[in-house]
Image (cartoon, helix red, strand yellow):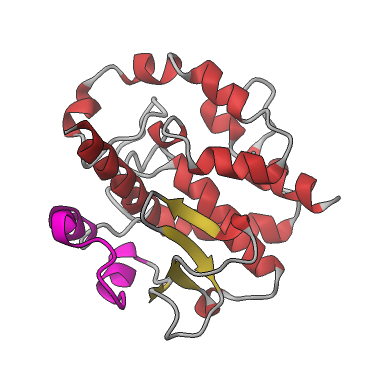
Amino acid sequence: MDQNEEFLKVLQHDLHKVQVPRALPHKIAMPNAKAQEADALAAWLGRNFQRDSFEKTIYRKSLIFPLRNFQNPRTLVSQHRAEVIDLFKEDDAIRLHNAILNSKLINLYCEARYYPYSSLKYHILLTCAFYYNMKHKFKLKELYLCENLPIKSPFQIIFQDQERTWAILPVRRKDGLSRIWPKFYQSWDYRKKISLGGDHRILAGVLSFISSWTAALASIEDFREFLEDT
């Protein structure tokens, strides 16, 4: 299996969660055991915030847009379902990763129905970043959340906007923004600089109590959308 096919499988391993026809079952969607380990690690970092009763919908609840949570989730998701299916038809792994990274649609889906604030989009990106680093023999304790640093592969990127690119990299302690702690707010509180400051003080405060990495990254994206709309 070449690298393109390998990372395509990682990026497409949760197609069943967006109800893509004939999607492979989760247990056999991953290319190997290390990818399954990366998926489990990303899930562990994402499913530690606001556990709720089982949700029949795959719609993600937003901490930034609470009123949106009261809309009909089935209508909101289903009207974009065809676009999401088309997005995952991309057969180049780097282009698919970039499409997911820049997609607002994928961020509408939660990763786990007991954790409605989790984000499928950022679970996929975290899984891919962990897999790339683990494939190159790096352990979690050696990885850092980094901002605007050179990367070896786009698969290491987990968040991007006009001002910053966040990637998970094996770098020297002084170069990283923060260690990858089990709870996002731990990494956020220990960060070495205020990446989101000034007009983002409210967001920075919100991030200080979110334990889920995927919920936190989704909230940053939601906040950016909020600023664009105001």
Q: Position of residue 227 (x, y in %)?
A: 21, 40
* Residue 9 location, quadrant: top right
Q: Is residue 40 above or below residue 108?
A: below
Q: Is residue 61 left or right of residue 167?
A: left
Q: Quadrant of the C terminus?
A: top left
Q: Position of residue 99 (x, y in %)?
A: 56, 37
Q: Is residue 35 left or right of residue 176?
A: right
Asked whether 205 or 194 is in front, the reply is 194
Asked whether 97 or 71 is in front, the reply is 97
Asked whether 3 or 31 is in front, the reply is 3
Q: Position of residue 6 (x, y in %)?
A: 76, 49
Q: Is residue 115 left or right of residue 37?
A: left
Q: Position of residue 175 (x, y in %)?
A: 45, 81
Q: Is residue 126 above or below residue 16?
A: below
Q: Decide whether the magenta segment is chiefly helix, strand or loop.
A: helix
* Residue 136 location, quadrant: bottom right
Q: Residue at x 54, y 47 (%)?
A: 124
Tell me where the magenta segment starts and ends, as one range.
Answer: 183-207
* Residue 211 location, quadrant: bottom left
Count of numbered tags: 0
Say if the magenta span includes residue 67.
no
The residue positioned farthest toward the right in the image shown: 1
Asked whether 42 or 189 is in front, the reply is 189
Q: Residue at x 35, y 43 (%)?
A: 115
Q: Residue at x 33, y 63 (%)?
A: 184
